[in-house]
Amino acid sequence: MPKFRKKPVEIEARQLTPETVDSIKRWIGASARIHTDGVPLGAPVKLAIDTLEGVMLADFGDFIIRGVQGEFYPCKPDIFAATYEAA
């Protein structure tokens, strides 16, 4: 079976924390909003992000990535660490 390797691409990413929620919302713009539907009172908030695949929810600790076409999407920390390194 043929094998393929990802092309090296630099991306921008920021980690979602309670301290970075507002700056990440400003960075993403109108396609990011606080998600509260079904979130228990006092639970950590989630950030809803409109992506090319639909709305995705980001938890604290997730990385928010701006892709090569300017699109945004969340990435779990373990996947981010296995896929990306500092440029």
Image (spheres, helix red, strand yellow):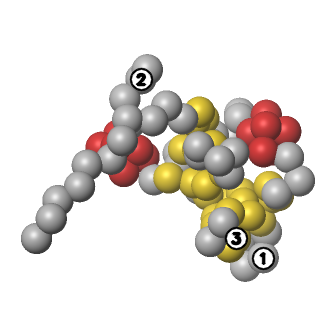
User: Where's residue 81, x and y in %?
Assistant: 35, 40
Q: Quadrant of the N terminus?
A: bottom left
Q: Which class describes the residues within 10 Å of circle 3: few (<14), some (14-19), or many (20+)?
A: some
Tell which of 84 and 69 is nearer to you.
69
Tell which of 61 and 9 is nearer to you.
9
**For the residue marked with disc 1, what is the amino acid?**
Asp
The reply to whether callout 1 and callout 2 are in contact (CB within 8 Å) is: no
Residue lying at the far left in this picture: please name it: 1
Q: Distance between the Cα atoms at labels 2 and 3?
A: 27 Å
Q: Residue 26: in sight, yes or no?
A: yes
Residue 46 as seen in the image, left or right of residue 84: right
**For the residue marked with disc 2, what is the amino acid?**
Ala
**For the residue marked with disc 3, what is the amino acid?**
Val
Q: Total number of numbered labels?
A: 3
Q: Mark 3 — residue?
A: 55
Residue 64 falls in image quadrant: top right
Q: Circle 3 — which element?
A: strand
The mark closer to the camera, 1 or 2, is: 2
Question: Which label sits on residue 14?
Answer: none
Q: Residue 22: in sight, yes or no?
A: no
Question: Which label sits on residue 86?
Answer: 2
Q: Which class describes the residues within 10 Å of circle 1: few (<14), some (14-19), or many (20+)?
A: few
Precedes in sequence: disc 2 or disc 3 = 3
Precedes in sequence: disc 1 or disc 2 = 1
Q: Mark 1 — residue?
A: 37
Q: Quadrant of the C terminus?
A: top left
